[in-house]
Every structure is written in C-alpha cells, then in structure tokens.
Image (cartoon, coloured by chain):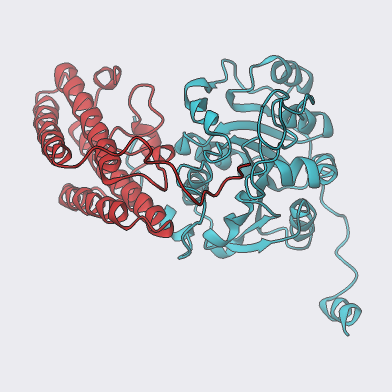
Chain colours: A cyan, B red
C-alpha cells in the first residue's frame, strides 16, 4: 500500500473560495463541493486553469464556492457556455455543474447535444430528484409516486434516465457517485476529467429539506459489481436494468473528442463591436 | 468497523492513518461550524469549532512524525465498508436546528467508531509496535468518548419538537 506521496503544491483547500455555502446543513452538495476540491488537488491543476460553469439552482451556486474561474449563468444553459469556453480556450479544464432540473428539464436539449458533440468537458449533475431552490416541485428524475404538497399522489410520470440518455446521445464517459462518499466522488471526477471527450458524472446528492427520505440513500448505494465497459450497448443494458444506486464508472468509451478544425474567425474587437450600444 | 484489523500497516502507514483521521475530523468540524454560523445556530457553531480545535491539536502533534496534509490520500486509508475515516462526522447528519446535545452525540459516535477501529487494529496487527500504538490510540479514543459522554449527561435532552420551525424554509399549506 503506497499511502505517502511527495508534497504537492495544491491542497484541496486551495480550490475553495472564502464564501461559505448557504445550502441547508445536511445537503449532499456540501460533499460534492468537498469532492470537487479533493479531485482538483489530485489533478494538481492550478485554480486559474480551471473554469466551473453552472446554470441556476441550489447546486449551481458551486462556482462561487471554488477558487477557480467561474460563471453562474442562465437556467439550463450551463452546457452551451461550457462548450463555447472549451472550444475557445482548449487549454482550460472546463467543469460544468448543476442540478437535475437545470440539466435535464430546462437544459435537457443542451444535455443531449453536449453528449453528441463530445467536447472534452466534464459535466457533474447533483441529482436530488427535486427542485429544491423553488421549494420542492418534482423534477424530471423524481419518482412517479413521490407524494408531496405540490404533487399530491405523485406525478405518475416516468422519470428521465440521465445515464442511459447520455450514453445513447454519445457521452464518452458515464459514471454515478453518491455524495455521502466524497472520496469516491473525488476519484470519479478525476477519472472523468482525465478521460477525453464529454464525461458525465451523476452524483446522487440528497435534498434533506424537501426529500428527507433521501437520507436513506446511504444504505442503498453500492459499488457497481462489474468493471467499466467500452461497449455502449452492454453499458446501456446494465444501466437500464440496475436499481439506480450502482456507483462507479459505468462506461468509458473510445470516441475521439470533437475539436473544431479552424480557429474562430472573429477576434475580441469584432465581438465587442457587435455588442456595442 | 469490522475490517479495520484486517489490513496490515507499517508504523509509518499507521502514523499516516492517524494524521489523516485527525486532519479530516478537524476539517469536517470546521465545515459543520461554518454551516451552523451561516444558519445562525451560534451555540452549535461554537461547539463544532471547539471540537475542530481539539482534533487539529492532535493533527499538529502528529506532524512531528513527518505527516503533512499533502502527503496523505485518505482514500487509501479507508477502513471496512465506511465511506469516510472513522472520526469524520458525516455531513448529512447536520440539521440547521440541531442542538448542542445533537452535536455532542455526533462527536461521541465519531470517537466510539475510532475507538472500535483502533481496538480492531490492536487485536489484529502483526507488528508489535503498531499493535502497541493502536492499543494506545484505542485507550485515548475511549477516554475522549467518556469525556464527551460526561459532558452530554450535563446537557438537557433536546425537546421532542427540536426540528419544528415556525418559519420553515419549506412550503406548507
């Protein structure tokens, strides 16, 4: 067991900002932030070479809590911003982060096409199966029978299945983690960033305020009993038939990431002129 | 903690384990203190801050054995089936209305878990020095647990409706 490594210039705390999160105590997003900072420390990329892009929602506050470059953007539009940034600045490590509502409902179409384009970015979705910021409406991943004041008796709707949709749309890396295992999530994020192309990491991140039942997730998650595959059909079968609580890397493909062949024709001056009032 | 004693640690690795445990425990209590400050729960914030300071003192003491923050990858040191090191308070146990009694009960669980882990290591370590270190650590964690238990006994029981908020963040009809 090799546990001691040479001292490294960046520790997890170097990726944290001075802002204290305003999430509810007990929220899984705290652990995802911790996992993110641990992952960046493992990667040893300087904070100024990392950009964290988000949309809207509780989890989308995450860029402010990191010491990296950040962009807290428009609802559901984090992926287009992240895609554009990576195309313009390929030397940056671009992490897009958000929640299930932002990513699969408001930004659902962008999710499909980001997977299809296979740009070399990492997308972390903190999935709590509810719209927490707007006080507990069912989201695309909510179970059909989840009974609440805002959806009495449940929605009766089939939940969106993000992992298999990512796979079918062309994502090159698909993984699932659990926020209660921040060290495991950190390892998944490291692998996702290192894997070329579009990497999708779904992190089951309980909303203890509107979904206190999700406190039980810690007893339900388990490591995927099989090794990752590069066979998309096999991965799809596994993901479609698992219980939704398998964690680990579920697919690691070999598709070459998309990189534009030509540099952008317009310079910064031309863009500024376009937007001049 | 069943698997703690199944791993074989060298003395250096054992010190790495100790350092990682104390360092992570201190960081976690600070994180919980920050959360409570943000949510205006001052008594629990100050209690978590105090616990962080105690754990940090232990970590600093262990630095004399050559351990540093950067040199540790806690993932390599996880024991048994736990997601986190035995003395690290799980983030999902926090509640914005928790009382000092809840916070101390959580700290007690952490100390008891660490004690069980060291008991298992002491019982199974093949190396004499590691076995002795583990036994010493187990005794220390049992002492800490006893201190917390005594402090906890002096606190009032949280009321049954401790988590009731007259101005809750959640929607109600």
Task: Give the percent coordinates (x, y) of residue A245.
Answer: 59, 23
- Decide if residue A174 is on the left or right side of residue B145: right
Res. A197 in view? no
- Considering only vertical position in the picture, is A153 above or below A106? above
The one of A139 and B59 positioned closer to us in this rendering:
A139
Residue B53 appears in which quarter of the rendering? bottom left
On screen, A232 above or below B104? Answer: above
Position of residue B67 measured from the top left corner of the image (x, y, whole percent)? 24, 47
Picture layout, residue A206 above or below residue A49: above
Q: Between B124 and B153, which is closer to the camera in this rendering?
A: B153
Quarter of the figure with residue A1: top left
Residue A33: where, in percent of width, then height? 51, 49
Q: Measuring 62% from the left and 40% from the top, which residue is drawn there?
A: A192
Q: Residue furthest bottom?
A: A277
Residue B76 visible in rendering: yes
Residue at figure coordinates x 56%, y 39% from the top left: A207
Residue B74 picture location, percent across and down: 36, 38
Residue closest to the eye, A45 or B78: B78
Q: Tell me if B130 is positioned left or right of A220 in this view.
A: left
Q: Name the residue at 40% across, 37% down.
A: B93
At a point 39% along the width and 47% down the height, the residue shown is: B97
Q: Nearer the viewer, residue A135 or A84?
A: A135
The picture quadrant where one finds residue B151 is top left
Q: In this view, does B85 lie to the left or right of A41?
A: left
């Amino acid at each position: 067991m090799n546990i001691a490594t040479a001292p490294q210039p960046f520790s997890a705390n170097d990726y944290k900002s001075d802002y204290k999160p305003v999430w509810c105590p007990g929220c899984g997003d705290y652990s995802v932030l911790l996992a993110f900072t641990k992952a960046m420390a493992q990667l040893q990329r300087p904070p100024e070479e990392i950009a964290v892009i988000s949309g809207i929602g509780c989890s989308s506050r995450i860029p402010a809590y990191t010491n990296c470059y950040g962009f807290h953007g428009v609802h559901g539009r984090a992926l287009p911003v992240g895609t554009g940034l990576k195309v313009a600045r390929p030397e940056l490590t671009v992490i897009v982060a958000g929640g299930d509502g932002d990513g699969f409902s408001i930004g659902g179409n962008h999710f499909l096409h980001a997977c299809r384009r296979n740009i070399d970015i990492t997308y972390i979705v903190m999935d709590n199966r509810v719209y927490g910021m707007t006080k507990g409406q069912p989201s695309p991943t909510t179970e059909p029978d989840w009974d609440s004041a805002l959806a009495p008796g449940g929605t009766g709707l089939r939940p969106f299945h993000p992992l298999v949709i990512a796979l079918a749309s062309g994502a090159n890396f698909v993984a699932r983690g659990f926020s209660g295992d921040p060290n495991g999530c950190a390892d998944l994020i490291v692998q996702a960033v290192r894997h070329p192309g579009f990497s999708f990491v779904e992190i089951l991140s309980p909303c203890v305020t509107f979904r206190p039942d999700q406190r039980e997730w810690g007893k339900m998650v388990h490591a995927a009993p099989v090794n990752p595959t590069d066979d998309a059909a096999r991965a799809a079968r596994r993901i479609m038939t698992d219980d939704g609580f398998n964690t680990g890397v579920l697919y690691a493909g070999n598709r070459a990431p998309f990189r534009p062949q030509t540099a952008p024709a317009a310079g910064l001056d031309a863009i500024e002129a376009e937007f001049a009032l | 903690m069943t698997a703690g004693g199944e791993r074989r640690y060298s003395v250096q690795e054992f010190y790495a384990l100790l350092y990682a445990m104390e360092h992570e425990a201190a960081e976690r209590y600070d994180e919980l203190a920050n959360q409570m400050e943000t949510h205006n729960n001052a008594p629990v914030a100050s209690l978590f801050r105090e616990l962080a300071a105690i754990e940090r003192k232990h970590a600093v003491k262990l630095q004399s054995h050559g351990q540093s923050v950067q040199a540790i990858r806690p993932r390599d040191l996880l024991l048994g089936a736990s997601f986190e090191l035995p003395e690290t308070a799980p983030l999902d146990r926090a509640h914005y209305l928790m009382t000092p009694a809840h916070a101390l009960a959580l700290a007690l669980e952490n100390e008891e878990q660490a004690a069980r882990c060291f008991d298992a290591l002491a019982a199974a370590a093949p190396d004499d020095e590691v076995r002795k270190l583990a036994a010493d650590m187990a005794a220390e964690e049992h002492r800490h647990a006893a201190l917390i238990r005594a402090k906890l006994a002096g606190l009032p029981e949280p009321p049954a409706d401790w988590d009731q908020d007259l101005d809750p963040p959640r929607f109600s009809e």
